[in-house]
Image (cartoon, rainbow, N blue to C red):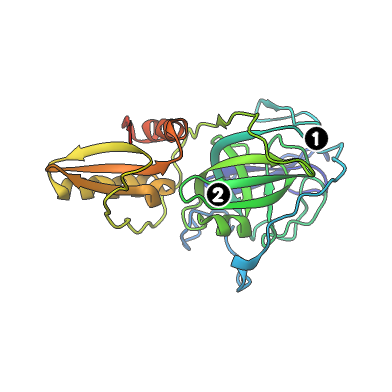
Amino acid sequence: MRSVGFGIRIFIGVSLVSAALVAGCSSTPKSSGSSGRGGGYYLDDGPGGNPPRDLDSIPDAVPKPEPLSRAANRPYSVFGRDYVPMSTLAPYRARGVASWYGRRYHGQRTSIGEVYDMYAMSAAHPTLPLPSYARVTNLSNGQSVVVRVNDRGPFLNNRLIDLSYAAAYRLGFIGSGSAMVEVELLIPGQPLTASAPPQTVPDRARPEPAPVEPPIATVADASGVYLQLGAFASRENADLFRDRVANELTWLAAALRIESRDGLHRVRAGPYRDRIEALAVSGHIREALEVTPIVVR
């Protein structure tokens, strides 16, 4: 059930259930099956029946000073895990898996009592101050949006942040349901800072499979940092391996490519900005596929 108070969501892919803590209510996870519409959303969630035609033109949230909610920023526990939200605006950057939520909660109340609008640039986060603003960057395609964080969640599968439908659309992962992102807290009136090093939140479960069009094989650029997942003497075997990875890790599909040189066909992902970013993604690949990528330039 929902209440106007402090709501929480539990995610499987982008599936969700909710509970109200302040009102003393609780709910248990419901078994979920695919809605049959693709994209990895569950429990009757997904895009609305008549989404706006101008989703690309929905502007980013504009950071501005706002008083923090006392109720929504208190320490709390979910499924035996304690969460201590940030009580002030301070430098924060982290990397992990983002998901999104849509029509199931459209028009309902967020953790700070506001009406959730799936077509606004907003997000849910377990510990960022409410309300606050964050820049979210899709590490697969470099797209960024600025969202207003006004809700709590997600709490399952080590998801880092849950975005509104509009924000996920702008970042390009509506179809796959999840993506590796970087989240940076924005402090109104202050320039961006790199003083807080990124923290990678591990994804302990594979993203839900979604229909994926295998990327076109291309020759990798000579510049940049890449992850090499495998090398094959047969181009056919390289294509099969690339397609397998694209279907297993939908959030990585757009970054996959094949470099053919000297009689070998190398399956690579990238490019990444530096070795640190490449190693962060490598950990997720290794855990999901039991394949150990190597960093190459």
Q: Secondary structure at mark 1?
A: loop
125 left or right, relative to 273: right
Residue carrying label 1: 73
In the displayed orientation, state which residue is furthest to the front: 223
247 left or right, relative to 13: left
Q: Secondary structure at mark 2?
A: loop
Q: Where's the C terminus, which quadrant?
A: top left
Residue carrying label 2: 14
Q: CA distance from mark 2 to mark 1?
A: 24 Å
Determine the residue positioned at 36% across, 45% down: 248
Judge whether residue 264 can be spotted in this image: yes
Within-10-Å neighbours for mark 1: few <14, some 14–19, many 20+: many
Report the mark closest to the observer, 2 or 1. Answer: 1
Of residues 8 and 98, the one nearer the viewer is 98
Instruction: Specify the quadrant of the image occupied by residue 224.
Output: top left
Q: Which mark is residue 94?
A: none
Q: How far across and how far down the image is residue 98, in percent?
A: 56, 44
Looking at the image, residue 228 lies above or below residue 177: above
Q: How far across and how far down the image is residue 58, in percent?
A: 66, 64
- The kind of residue tagged 1 is Asn
Q: Between disc 2 and disc 1, whose residue precedes?
A: 2
Judge whether residue 28 can be spotted in this image: no
Determine the residue positioned at 42% across, 54% down: 210
Q: How far across and how far down the image is residue 271, in percent?
A: 39, 44
